[in-house]
Amino acid sequence: AVVSTQSTGEEEKVTTKLKSNKYDGLMITPKDEKVLLEGYLYKQSHNTFKTWKRRYFIIKTNQLHYQKRGKGKDEDNKVVSEDLRISQVRSTDEQDRRYCFELIMPTKKIFLQADSQKVKDAWIKSLQCGIEAAIHNTTSTNENDSERERKGGYNPPENIKSGNSEEILRLLDDIKNLPGNELCADCGSNEPVWASINLGVTLCILCSGIHRNLGVHISKVRSIEL
């Protein structure tokens, strides 16, 4: 696996820890500052036999990708998680293999296997840092938008600014109909009517109150019906 040294904050702590502990099978390199971690893992397929196949995974720009044959061409690249902000990673004992962990997303989850415990720990830590960094970047962007709005420099889309109610209702329906949005992201309740617009998840009324208490720098809650 390959870890970038061109990261900051929590991501930098990962590379420091890797260097100090000399993780098995990991090589520190600054080749691409956008890549947090890359290397081979085994991925369980979704077919009937649940076979395991070795793939080359990359954590880059708030996404998790994999390629079938190592560093190949872009057309060989497949996205596992399009947005790490709405993903969760954890160790698992559900498999009969060692060094397994799972990545949980709103509509699916995948099982991955590392070559050793140290490599597994490195992937879990790097994914956690990638999730935290994605949320932090979104929060910073939202704060900048709010500042521009207060100064009169923020321009919403024309169809929203003009008060086109039909267009607004259509957009809200599109949001509700997205896979996974029929359930509250936190508790799984049906037909949520609130959303955290910076985290990109739908919420029931109870969970929306919890998110409001976290503060807008963590979760910015809006109604998807009003």
Image: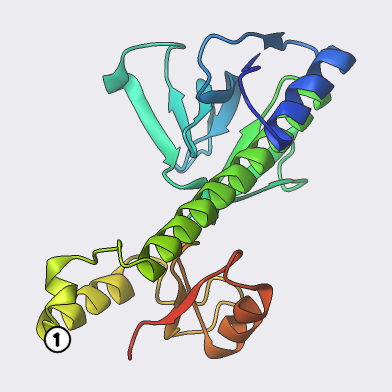
- Residue at horizontal 74 percent and vertical 38 percent from the top: 96
Residue situated in front as seen by the camera: 131 or 26: 131
* CA neighbours of label 1 inside 10 A, class few (<14), some (14 to 19), many (20+): few
In this rendering, would 67 be left or right of 216? left
Q: Where is residue 155 shown, x and y percent of the image?
A: 24, 64
Q: Secondary structure at mark 1?
A: helix
- Residue positioned most to the right: 21
Q: As displayed, is residue 82 above or below residue 106?
A: above
- On the question of residue 106 being in view, the answer is no
Q: Where is residue 8 shown, x and y percent of the image?
A: 66, 30
Q: Where is residue 217 shown, x and y percent of the image?
A: 59, 64
Residue situated in front as seen by the camera: 75 or 173: 173
Residue situated in front as seen by the camera: 222 or 203: 222
In this rendering, would 192 be left or right of 226? right
In this rendering, would 44 be left or right of 16? left
Residue highlighted by disc 1: 165
Q: Looking at the picture, which amino acid does disc 1 mark?
A: Ser
- Residue at horizontal 60 percent and vertical 46 percent from the top: 131
| Rendered-image quadrant of the N terminus | top right
Q: As displayed, is residue 206 above or below residue 220?
A: below
Q: As displayed, is residue 143 above or below residue 193?
A: above
- Residue at horizontal 19 percent and vertical 79 percent from the top: 168
